[in-house]
Image: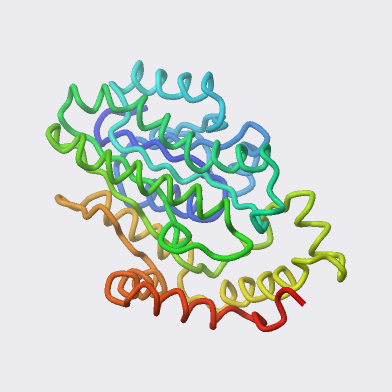
């Protein structure tokens, strides 16, 4: 690894936004880039033409495993003096109404989307404080601004991440450490095809007699349509992440799609009772729910 540039650690870098960001960092900057993914997904880097080189390390990292988190951060400290920019991008989404969530489902969701990013931030902060510099960028979602039916625990994980990130923003400001939340909305990608179902939600989606069947019947294709119609792409969002990474004074929250900016404005200025009434009335097929 040649000297110069900063060390950027990116989680979940084999697909979607993570892969688009990896390509931009390797193409457009002189940073040292440490790209991570679960061990079972590492082969995808080769499939996508991303290889180790003088500026790039590829490492296995399951963000839910403490030993793997520590191993990667310790290697960065030994080789480069620490992580200069942490991008917590890895995430998963469960599609399930709250009644269909088992405790194990909830814990799996929170481990990936909340506990993993927070623990990685804790591990890189001592080095950043010593240098009185550093950046932590957590990828959130419109789901961290508003809750959507059938995505209850996904929103819970992103709301939790937003709260912790906001507190961290204030806590580390005295050391000139910059903290930001990237808030994408709907993105033109196939990510909606990879959402996970709980045992109960999968059964309800397939069974016309289940109480929540209409919820899934209408929400799943509705979300798929919004993803297909969206103009934002993983690469366009990666560009906004890079811009945030290099801003001298980046904001805490960065809505990076049109719908994210609209929801941010609506939540700020619309009376809450009107906001909830309008969103409920806008849900697809809502008049059939509960029948």
Residue at 57 percent across and 76 percent down: it is 226
Residue at 64 percent across and 54 percent down: it is 98
**Quadrant of the drawing holding the C terminus:** bottom right
Choose top left, top right, bottom left or bottom right for residue 243: bottom left
Q: Is residue 99 left or right of residue 51?
A: right
**Quadrant of the drawing holding the N terminus:** top left
Vertical comparison of 211 with 57: above or below: below
Residue at 26 percent across and 22 percent down: it is 126
x and y, in percent, of residue 197 in the image: 72, 53
Residue at 69 percent across and 54 percent down: it is 99
User: Front-most of 259 and 189?
Assistant: 259
x and y, in percent, of residue 219 in the image: 66, 72
Q: Is residue 14 left or right of residue 25?
A: right
User: Front-most of 47 and 246?
Assistant: 246
Q: Is residue 290 left or right of residue 107?
A: right
**Residue farthest top in this picture:** 78
**Residue farthest left in this picture:** 174
Q: Is residue 94 left or right of residue 126?
A: right
Q: Which color mode does the image show?
A: rainbow
x and y, in percent, of residue 53 in the image: 45, 34
Vertical comparison of 289 with 196: above or below: below
Choose top left, top right, bottom left or bottom right for residue 65: top right
Vertical comparison of 171 with 81: above or below: below
User: Front-most of 210 and 46?
Assistant: 210
x and y, in percent, of residue 118 in the image: 41, 34
Count of marks, rendered view: 0
């Amino acid at each position: 690894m040649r000297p110069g540039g900063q060390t950027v650690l990116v989680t979940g870098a084999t697909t979607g936004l993570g892969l688009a960001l990896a390509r931009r960092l390797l193409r457009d900057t002189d940073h040292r880039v440490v790209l991570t993914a679960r061990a079972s997904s590492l082969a995808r880097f080769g499939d996508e033409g991303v290889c180790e080189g003088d500026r790039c390390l590829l490492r296995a990292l399951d963000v839910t495993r403490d030993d793997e988190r520590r191993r990667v951060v310790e290697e960065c400290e030994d080789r480069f003096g620490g992580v200069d920019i942490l991008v917590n991008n890895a995430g998963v989404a469960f599609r399930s109404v709250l009644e269909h969530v088992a405790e194990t489902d909830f814990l799996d969701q929170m481990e990936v989307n909340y506990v993993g990013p927070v623990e990685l931030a804790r591990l890189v902060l001592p080095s950043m404080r010593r240098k009185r510099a550093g950046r932590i960028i957590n990828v959130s979602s419109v789901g961290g601004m508003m809750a959507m039916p059938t995505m209850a625990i996904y929103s819970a994980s992103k709301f939790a991440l937003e709260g912790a990130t906001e507190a961290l923003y204030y806590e580390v400001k005295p050391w000139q450490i910059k903290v930001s939340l990237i808030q994408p909305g709907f993105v033109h990608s196939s990510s909606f095809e990879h959402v996970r179902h709980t045992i109960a939600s999968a059964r309800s989606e397939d069974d016309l007699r289940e109480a929540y069947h209409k919820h899934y019947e209408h929400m799943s294709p509705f979300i798929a349509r919004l993803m297909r119609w969206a103009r934002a792409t993983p690469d366009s969002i990666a560009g906004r992440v890079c811009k945030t990474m290099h801003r001298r004074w980046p904001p805490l929250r960065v809505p990076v799609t049109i719908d994210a900016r609209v929801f941010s404005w609506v939540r700020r200025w619309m009376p809450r009772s009107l906001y909830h009434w309008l969103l409920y009335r806008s849900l697809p097929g809502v008049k059939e729910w509960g029948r």
